[in-house]
Amino acid sequence: MKKNQPPDSKTRTKIKINGNEYILRSSYPSSYNEELAVYVDKKMKEIRMQNPSLGASRLAVLTALNITDELFKLQADHDVLLGLIEEERKK
């Protein structure tokens, strides 16, 4: 199964992020949901190490901004690569 195409059925996964447990209801497999949670938790820990006095809300916002920055950079790289592929196809 591709990660960007969820199946029809829902799964419930207990995840832990920043010391808090959540039940995530998702169309994706539990293993994928756990992988996402581990990544977010890791990013939060990295930011907390640099800014130990941050409250949970600010930590969450900074983590979201950092992950979004990663996403935007990867999307830009992806677009460049698609452009290069298209140029090669036209030759």
Image (cartoon, rainbow, N blue to C red):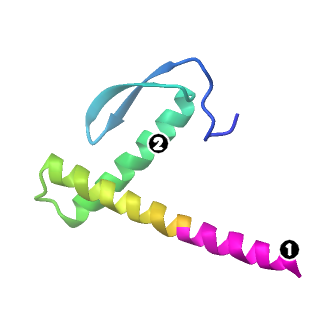
**Callout 1, which amino acid?**
Arg
Q: CA distance from mark 1 to mark 2?
A: 35 Å
Tell me the quarter of the image containing the N terminus.
top right
Whether residue 45 is situated above or below residue 79 in the rendered picture: above
The part of the image, by quadrant, that contains residue 67 is bottom left
Let me know if residue 89 is in the magenta part: yes
Q: Earlier in the sequence, mark 1 or mark 2?
A: 2
Instruction: Return the mark for residue 13.
Output: none
Residue at 27% across / 42% down in the picture?
A: 18
The part of the image, by quadrant, that contains residue 6 is top right
Decide: marks 1, 2 in contact (CB < 8 A)? no
Q: Residue furthest bottom?
A: 91
Q: Position of residue 36 (x, y in %)?
A: 47, 42
Q: Residue furthest right?
A: 91
Instruction: Return the mark for residue 36.
Output: 2
Q: Position of residue 56 (x, y in %)?
A: 16, 47
Whether residue 12 is situated above or below residue 33 in the rendered picture: above
**68 or 45: nearer the viewer:** 68
- Please give the range of residues in magenta: 76-91
